Image (spheres, rainbow, N blue to C red):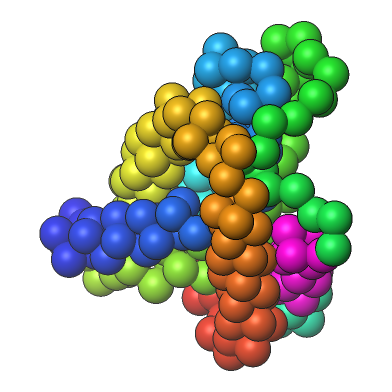
């Protein structure tokens, strides 16, 4: 079965990923601030469903496709890096708005909230790389049942991500209230988020690691 070191390694990587600003955090926060905690939690349920798709793909050994077709993996990785760079620019550009700033987004129905959370997670390059390149590194074929190892390690990532994202949704209103009327703090938050997104994009584009067959 899987080693404790592998569980801790995936948990640490998942924690670092979820604490770093990205599409999931930006969508969940903006929707919570504009429409309330219930909307944020429904959106989080959609994000959870997206994790389920990635987990099923990893368990089925889909990452092996990227291991034998490196050009496809490179294309996905560069597309993800470009998307993160675009998000970084949206955060720091003149006139940009912090995700914690009060907004006037139109209220979405429950079905759309769930669907957008689901799609946002599916198109999240950070999660794609996590399942295509990172989690497979912790799978040890000599310990048997590769699919079960992938399932358990993926479950660890999902548990960490949903716990942290849930706390972010519950605290988004409070953070937004604190930042309201503090434009310097809002600008600082935008630049920190933009810098982190840009840094991840550069690391993603220059990373030479390749997924290994599961």
Residue shown at the point (38%, 40%) measured from the top left? 164
Residue located 51% across and 44% down the image: 55
**Image coordinates for residue 44, horizontal then vertical, percent:** 55, 28
Q: Where in the figure is residue 41, as x and y percent of width and height?
A: 53, 20
For residue 5, side relative to residue 213 (left or right): left
Residue drawn at x 73%, y 59% as measured from the top left: 91
Q: For this view, does 69 lie left or right of residue 189?
A: right
- Classify residue 210 as left or right of residue 155: right
x and y, in percent, of residue 184 in the image: 60, 56
Image quadrant where one finds the N terminus:
bottom left
Q: Is residue 168 left or right of residue 37?
A: left
The span picked out in magenta is 77-93
Residue 125 picture quarter:
bottom right
Camera sees residue 46 = no
Dominant secondary structure, magenta: helix
Q: Visible in this render: residue 43?
A: yes
Q: Residue at x 33, y 68 (%)?
A: 138
């Amino acid at each position: 079965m899987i080693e404790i070191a592998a569980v801790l390694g995936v948990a640490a990587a998942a924690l670092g990923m979820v604490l770093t600003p990205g599409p999931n955090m930006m969508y969940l926060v903006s929707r919570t601030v504009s429409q309330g905690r219930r909307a944020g939690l429904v959106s989080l349920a959609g994000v959870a469903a997206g994790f389920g798709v990635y987990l099923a793909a990893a368990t089925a050994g889909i990452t092996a496709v990227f291991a034998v077709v490196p050009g496809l993996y490179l294309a996905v990785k560069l597309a993800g890096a470009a998307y993160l760079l675009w998000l970084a620019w949206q955060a720091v550009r003149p006139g940009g708005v912090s995700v914690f700033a009060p907004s006037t987004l139109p209220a979405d129905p429950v079905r759309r909230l769930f669907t957008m959370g689901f799609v946002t997670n599916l198109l999240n390059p950070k999660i794609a790389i996590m399942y295509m390149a990172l989690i497979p590194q912790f799978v040890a074929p000599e310990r048997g049942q590769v699919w079960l190892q992938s399932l358990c390690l993926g479950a660890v990532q999902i548990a960490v991500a949903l716990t942290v994202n849930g706390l972010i949704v519950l605290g988004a209103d409070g953070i937004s209230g604190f930042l309201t009327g503090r434009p310097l703090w809002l600008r600082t938050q935008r630049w920190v988020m933009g810098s982190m997104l840009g840094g991840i994009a550069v690391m993603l584009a220059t990373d030479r690691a390749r997924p290994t067959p599961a």
